[in-house]
Amino acid sequence: MGARHASAVTRTGHELVAVAGRRQEAAEALASRYGARGTIDYRSVLADRSLDAVIVATPTHLHREYAVAAAEAGKHVFCEKPIALTLADGEAIIGACRKAGVRLGVGHALRYFPMYAMATDLVVEGKLGRPGVVRAARYNRYPMGGGNWFADESKSGGVILDLNIHDFDWLRWTFGEVASVFTRIRSGPQYAYALTVLRFDNGTIAHVEGSWAHGGFRMAYEIAGSGGMVSFDSDKHLPLVVKSRREAEAGPGVIIPDSPLAEDPYVVQLKDWLDGRPMRLVPEDGLAALAIGLAALESARTGEPVRPAYRGGEAG
Amino acid sequence: MKIGLLSMAHIHAGLFYAPYFQQTGHLHAIWDDDEARGREAAATYGCRFEPDLAKLLRAVDGVVITTENTKHKDLAVAAARAGRHILCEKPLATTRADCLTMMEEARRAGVILMTAMPCRFHPAYHRIKAAVDNGEVGALVGIAATNQGHYPGGWFGTPELAGGGTVMDHTVHVADLLRHLTGSEVKSVYAVADRRFYPDVPAEDCGSISVEFENGVIATIDPSWSLPKPYARPFNVTMEVVGTQGTITVDMFYQVIDLWAGGNSLEIWGSNAYHLMPQRFVDACTKGAPVVVTGEDGFRAAEVAFLAYESIRQGKPVVRGA
C-alpha cells in the first residue's frame, strides 16, 4: 500500500517529500519516482519541520508505534486499515492524534469506491426498502511479497482483519451497528477462507466471505431489500480486459482486467484528509470495524456468536 | 410403469411432473384432496381423476407426492403399505419423526423411496463433483452456497402446511449437494432468519446458515426468498467452492439466453434436471437403476433445516445428534 499511496499523494496537489522504509534501496527506488528522498531513518522524517503529514503503511502490528510517534511530532496522520490489531492500540493512536491536535485518517478506501458508495446511498435513501439479506465477498491470492508479513497473522491479523475488514466497515457504514458475529475459518499452507454471518441492530442479515485461496482478485456484493435488489461483481461488471500475446515478465498470454476511473478512489480519499475536508469516516469507525473483526476471530475460536466489544460511540 | 400423481398442490406438479409423465406415457391418474383442482388437472393432462386414494394406489405402480410438505408422511405411508414406489417432493417431511417413519415404512414394504432433488442430476453438478473428486482444486476447504428465489406464494408461506418458511423450502437442495460433494455428514449448524421482505407472510423469508461438516469442511447456505419481482431470474443455485489448490465458481442454472420482449427474462437452455430426475425414478422402478437421492438422503438434507430452526430458537450453534 506504500507504493499506491506514494503515487496517490502526487496526484492530490500535495508534495511527496520522503519515503521511509526498512531497506534503503527500496525506499529510494520508490521515492525517486516522485522526486522524493528515501531513507531507513523514519525519525529524521518526523523531525523534518517542512513536512506536514505522514502516511503510515507499515505492517499493521506496527501502526501504533509509528502513528503515535508521527502525532507526537505534530504531523497529521493517515493510517492504513485496519487501524491496529487491538482496540487498545487503536485507541492509543486516536488518543495521541487528538492530544496533538492533528487530523487522523483511517484508510477504509472502500467507502471511496463508487460502486460501494452508490449502494450505500441506495440503502440510506430507502430505494431498496427495508434491507433484508446482504452478501459481501472478497477474494484474493494468498499474500506474497513485502516480506510476506500479510501471511503472518500476528502482523496482519490474517484474512479476517486484513481482508474482511473492508466489508465489515462498509456494511457497518451502510446498515449501522453490528449486534452479533458468527465466523468459521479454515486456513493452512497457502490458503485461508472465512465465512461470517452478521446480524445488525436493525435486523439486517449479512453474509461475508473472505478468501486468500483464490487465483486472483474479485469482489462482489448483493443487497436485497423489500423494495429491490442491487448487486455488483468485479468479474461481471467490467468495462475492459487486455489480453496480451506478447512475451512479458509474467509470461506469455497475460490477461489484465481493468476498470479505470478519472478519479482514483485512493486519491480522493487522501485529498479529503490532506485538504482537511470531512472524510467519509471518523477514526472511531476504524475502531468499530476492528471490533467486528476481533469478534469474528473470537467467534471462530469459541464457536459462539459474539457481540463486538466496541461499537460506534460506545466506550470499549 | 403407471404413475399416480398425488395432488396438484405443489407448483412442480403442473410445471414438471404432470407434463413429463404425460409425455412419456406414465401418467395414469391424479388424486387430490382439492377435487376441483384435481379434476381440472386430469382434464389438462389427459388422465383419470381418482378421488379415492386406496383405489388409485391399487391401480398404479408408483406415486409422486406433490402435496403440501406436512402431508407427505401420511401419503407416503399409505403408498408404501400398498406396495407402491414413491418419489417425494422435497423436503422429504417437516419433522425428524415423519422422515424416519417414511423411511421405515418404505424399507419394510420393499419399495423405492426417492427424494426429488433435481440439482443432483444437473450436468453442471456432475462436472463440479468430478473436479472435486479428481483433486482439481486440491482438498475441499469451504463452500459458500445460495439457493435464493422469489417468494413462491400460496401455502409456502403457511407454516402449518409448509413446515416453516424459506429455511424449510430452500435449505435442502444445497444441503443435499454439500453432503454429496463433501462426502461427509453435517456436524454443527448455526443459523439466523427473519421476516423482512413479506411482513404479511407468517413465516421467515430470509436467512443465513453456517455449517461445519464432520470432515472439517465449512459451508454456508443462503436460502432466502430475496430475489425481487420482477427479476429476470426467479431462482438460483450458486456455489463458491474453495479448495487448497483451486476454486470453482458455480451458477448452476446460468446456461441462458438473455431475452428482452416486453420485459427481460433469462431463458434456460441447460439440460432439464426436472426431466432427468423423474426419469431416473422410472428407471429405478422398472430397470433396477440405482436410486439417486434416497429417502435417507432426503432426511439428512431436511435435517439441516431442522437443525437451523433449532439454532434460530437457541441463538447459538447446535450439534447434530446432541
Image: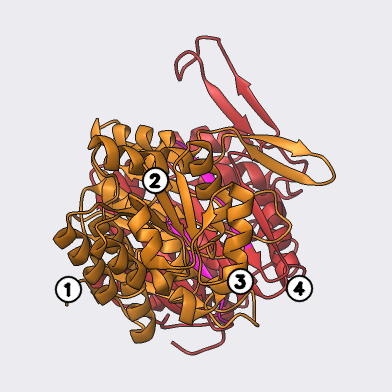
Chain colours: A red, B orange
- Identified by mark 1, the residue type is Gly
* Placement of A80 over or under B264, stated as above or below: below
Please tell me whether mark 1 sits on a helix, a strand or a loop.
Answer: loop
Q: Disc 3 marks which residue?
A: B154
Q: Disc 1 marks which residue?
A: B321
- Identified by mark 3, the residue type is Gly
Task: Tell me the tag on residue A65.
Answer: none
Q: What residue is at 69 percent from the left and 43 percent from the top?
A: A10
Q: Chain of mark 2?
A: B
- Circles 2 and 4: CB atoms closer than 8 Å: no
- Mark pair 1, 4: CA separation: 43 Å
Q: From the image, state whether disc 2 or disc 4 is nearer to you.
A: 2
- Circles 3 and 1: CB atoms closer than 8 Å: no
The magenta segment is A203-223
Please tell me whether mark 4 sits on a helix, a strand or a loop.
Answer: loop
Question: Can residue A53 be seen by looking at this rendering?
Answer: no
Q: Is there one chain holding both mark 3 and mark 1? A: yes
